[in-house]
Amino acid sequence: MIRATDLLRIVLRQQVRQLNYGVILAVAFGICIYLSMGILGKEIETLIGQDINFIGGVSVIKASLEEHYFPDTPPQSFAPAVLEQVRSMPQVLSASTSMRRVCWVPMTVGQRTFDLYALGVDPWFWTTNSITAFQGRLLDAADEAKRARVCVLGGEIAQILFGEGPYIGRIVGIHNDNYEVVGIGIGIMLRGNWCFIPLGTAMDRGIHDAAPNRMQLRMRRLEDVEPMARIIPDIVSQKQQSLHLKVEFAGEELSKILGIVRWVRILLTLGIASSLILGCMGIWQGTFAAVRERTREVGLKLAMGAERWDIWAQFLGEAICKSVLGGILGIVLGAVCIYVTGFLLHIPIVWTKFGQDSLLCAGAATLVGVVGGMYPAILASRMDAVHALRYE
Amino acid sequence: MNTLIRLEGLHKGYAGAKVLRGISLEVAAGQIVAIMGPSGCGKSTLLHILGLLLTPDLGRYEVLGQEMFALNHREKARFRRQFFGFILQSCNVFAHTTVAENVEYPLIYAGVPRRERLRRVRNLLAQVHLEANENERSNTLSGGEQQRVAIARALINNPRILFADEPTGQLDRSNTEHLMRHFREVATQMHLGIVIVTHDAQVAAHCDVVHTLRDGMLEARGNEPAMGGRPGCVGFQLGKP
């Protein structure tokens, strides 16, 4: 019986000299997509969730305490324990609180006076609402801690106030106090004349008359929005008394987008499955063709003393070798795709998960080779030696 | 004389037609035996039965004193590995493999370690003057060179009996002459019994015994040595013109 090392050498030699690129690429393609989806899928869904906010912030849940509708009820705000708990939940990307209501305040620039919306925000506000700094920086925890008199202007109002700029370092008067402009914020959800100041500063300076009673949660995945919205009342009621909690999310838009995401997922899964099936069929047909082409070789080998197992092992080994080569190529391509995509989209890559998934893919590739090559290899091994030697 | 093969009363038929009818045959060490006959008379069938590739309907077959037809499939394969060598008419080399890899195959199936295999392959290739072609693809060689590769492969496991089915079918007269001289030399040096199925009178002229298969039965005649080719009478270099 042929030794395993000799079998491996013969099989590899045969593959190197008779590379079947179509089959190898089909398997590699399937593995590459599977790995990319497995490693980047959730992160990309998160990014998609952030990028499709123009439809109405579908990944954002808004919760508010609406006691002001009831004149005899004292003002309420979300307890820090509530915020801590929701921020610790893995499905929550960020949770932000803001003031009870947006104030329409006068702003003075030089001799001119404008009206604008001023909102006290915490450092998580930007991530939750997909607002990025177009110039300068956004308000951070240090501003909050120092109760700094700094502000971030929306792009539109900045242009109205200061024309083409420069914007950073300019002083604006809000509610009888001077504030330094430290950044210009832009975002799809940011429309209108907005001015953001640190939450603590807003409360100290009397811009708002009560503690924050609005909470916004951005979910990592769209599927988590509705379940999370359902459990928010339970979370709040465990931590504080909340008589008039209101929870909102864009249900109709969400269900439409989830439908689109589901279809994309199905299409990708079909792509993976079809490429692996294609690889399997290619290996099946390729091994059949090899058996036909090398029938006399099989006869000769049987004549020189090869056992049926040797013939079976060689053809099956060649089939597995093809699919494993495809698998290895797919893993390498997958690693490159994941690295490049992660680099471009600033997604942190969990390489240990990639290692685990790669092992799974190597197993799947081997299975493709076994399924594709088993029957032709059995046929070859059962071949009658005389019939094979006389084959033309 | 040391008898390698003893065949008695062999019968074989296909679909009701009797191809071989009571064949008896003996082959001794160092002897070259030719089996001739018209096309379709059963020469190759007889060779395949002798090579344990085909099972007869009836008969008794001994090789080196051991009864062959009692062996099972695996035992026959092992016996072929240890004691038999095969050379065919055409397509004798494996595509996509080098000369050395072709010759190495029987040793791989015999489980010989790689280092020992390479040593034996190199020695044998030197004997058939193919050492310079060791790493060449077999299918790039000429017909005569391919046949020398096949001979080297058939001899690599030091067989006791060599079976050749029309080995000169694709060779010209000159190469046929060289091949037969080569057979004579190895038969003598290795005490090898060689059974050749052939149409070619030139080949038959080099054999010690020529059997003609007619109507399923063998007719034997002795052969005068055409080139002083009795065992021990060799005086030429292998594979050289």
Image (cartoon, rainbow, N blue to C red):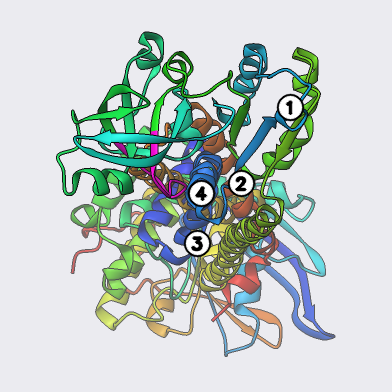
Q: Amino acid at mark 2?
A: Ala
Q: Is residue B53 above or below residue B131?
A: below
The subunit letter for the residue under badge 2 reads: A
- The answer to whether marks 3 and 2 sit on the same chain is yes
Cβ–Cβ under 8 Å for marks 1 and 2: no
- The answer to whether marks 1 and 2 sit on the same chain is yes
Using residue B205 as the reference point, say whether residue A383 is left or right of it.
right
Kindly identify which residue carries mark 3. Answer: A26
The disc label shown at residue A364, or none: 2
Q: Amino acid at mark 3?
A: Ala
Instruction: Calculate the distance from the C-alpha at mark 1 to the C-alpha at mark 2.
Output: 58 Å
Of the numbered discs 1 and 4, the one sitting upstream in the chain is 4
Residue at screen point 61% across, 46% down: A364
Using residue A16 as the reference point, say whether residue B135 is left or right of it.
left
- The answer to whether marks 3 and 1 sit on the same chain is yes
**SS for callout 2:** helix
Q: Is residue B199 above or below residue A211?
A: below
Q: Amino acid at mark 1?
A: Glu
Q: Position of residue A244 (x, y in %)?
A: 78, 28
Using residue B233 as the reference point, say whether residue A227 is left or right of it.
right
**SS for callout 1:** helix
Mark 1, mark 4: which one is toward the viewer?
Answer: 1
Of the numbered discs 4 and 2, the one sitting upstream in the chain is 4
Of the numbered discs 4 and 3, the one sitting upstream in the chain is 3
Pick the quarter of the image with the C terminus of chain A.
bottom right
Instruction: Calculate the distance from the C-alpha at mark 4 to the C-alpha at mark 2.
Output: 29 Å
The subunit letter for the residue under badge 4 reads: A
Kindly identify which residue carries mark 1. Answer: A67
Count residues near mark 1 (Cα–Cα under 10 Å), then give few for <14, some for 14-19, many for 20+: some
Magenta residues, start to end: A184-195
